[in-house]
Amino acid sequence: MTRPDVTVTVTVIVYNDAARLPRAVASLRAQTHANIEIVISDDHSTDETPAVARELAAQDHRIRYIRLPENSGGCSAPRNRAIEIARAPYLMFLDSDDELPPRAVESLLAAHRERDVDFTMGAVRRVRVDNGRRSTWMPHLVAERRTLEGIEADPRLLFEHLSTSKMYARAFLDRHQLRFPEGIHYEDQLFSAQAYCLAEAFTIIPEPVYVWYIEPFADASSASISNQRHKISNVADRVYVQRLIDEFLVSSGHAGLREDKDYKFLKHDFRMYAGDLPYRDEEWLTSFAEIMNPYLDTLSPEAYGRLPRAERVVLELLRDGRLAEARLAARGLGHAVAPRRVTTDGTGVPYWGDTVPSTDRARRELDVSELELDTRPFPTALFRHEITELTPGAGATLTLAIRTYDPGLRLPVGPQRASLLLSPGRRRMTVPFRLDPVRPGVFEGTVRLDLVSAPVPLHGFQGVRHPVVRLDQQGLSHSGLLLAPLDFPARTARIDYHSGAAPHELTVEPEGRNPGRLQLRWRPVGVTARITRPAIRRLARPRVRNAARLVASALK
């Protein structure tokens, strides 16, 4: 039964998250629109969540607590049980590890009242838990206020598949018997695709309506479903949901969206796995291909054609069963890293790899002509720098054997001037070395990096840096990232910079994600951590800076 004094029901789903549940609920109690119902839907937690939830319900009459009789293993069942008992004409969903901004309910409800639509949606603010960095999820899709009469008006919205960024009219969900699919993961993707297609109209607002906390390096046991890509079952779940979406598009009369949906899968879903391929073993890659390739074969050729060439290469190598090469091509995706080698056919068309492809599809997908390997301006040319051997020395020295691949033959025959660049702070460390030719398009050199001489500021430096390789040619320079071996053991040393006034711990390690660069991680210790950096932070506060400026102005 609906209640006239309750306009919005917000469901918080929770499972074994007693520590963060109060924060999520507090964000609802702080909403500027107060006439809300808060349903805590517990997927049969085994920690202190039930006690915490009951205590929260005792503090606020708007809060109701329900507990599923057994764990469902996903988000759908707790959301659906909450929909069954919701008393308001509008519904929203919140995960227990996230929050709603204070005006989220007010803003989305106002958009509903401005025009009778099936759902409203707004911007999602993403916050990295490890570094506090903030960004907006899919900002180009929510940049302006607009009402769309059907998803065909902007199929790009298929990329925004979160159910938590939206407020749904209860009548819309009931009219179409729209509920979250139970027993599967990636339920948001199917639910949102159905909502987009079934809605006659929906409104987008640019205001933030959801705070999504991202923990990219969470422990595997507590990582979100999207961060469990190392599990083959995760791959199977994602592909299964895509097939369900495809079936729905046909049955609902929206088959015309298939190319856009396929492009979204390739650009977003597959791309998430592609970046991980260099870190997967042969057994995992084989299982991945067995699940992924049959589905890739059903996708629209036009969707492939909309991708950047580097991503098309990875996809084709995977579909061709060239798994080791797919892993190699995936390193550096999105970072302008060249292939090690290209091969031309009789007409001069360059193809990725050591051989000319044998099929029409492979020739189309592995043709790298558009990369302009031999004609791009030198500062934007494509090279590939790899560490072939890394040798720790005395103290904090490293000797790196570097191999540079130049598939476009941009570098002249003979030794090349190169430098290793590193900036732990505002000053840059430049270590020159020489690259000698080994064969056409391949150069090798050795550089000794003494990290004791790195220009760390007197007040210390805390953070991560990745050295880059600079090539100098006829007054022009080119900087490119440096790929490291993926399996060398991390090494930590204490360095007393500035004659012991700025002690740090420095860790040298492979990046462990993305392209796998050489990674250097500084952490202040001793007096730097206890005294120097806290003092600098106090001086950097706006009030202190303004006072300093005032004093400086008075002394002029």
Image (cartoon, rainbow, N blue to C red):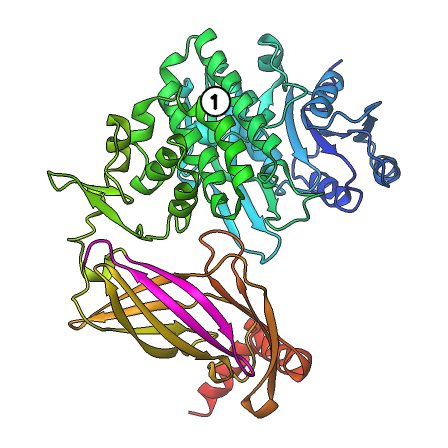
**Could you say which quadrant of the image residue 29 lies in?**
top right
Membership of 389 in magenta stretch: yes
Main SS class of the magenta portion in the image? strand
Q: Is residue 305 left or right of residue 467?
A: left
Residue indicated by mark 1 = 202
Q: Amino acid at mark 1?
A: Phe
**What percent of the width, then of the height, locates residue 35?**
71, 30
Q: Nearer the viewer, residue 99 or 224?
A: 224
Q: Is residue 521 above or below residue 149?
A: below
Up/down of 452 relative to 300, above or below: below
* Residue 118 pos. (x, y %): 53, 18
The residue shown at (37%, 79%) is: 431
Tell me the element at label 1. strand
Measured as percent of width and height from the top left, residue 316 is found at 35, 33
143, above or below 545, in the image: above
Decide which of 448, 307 is in the foreground and name it.
Answer: 448
The span shown in magenta is 383-409
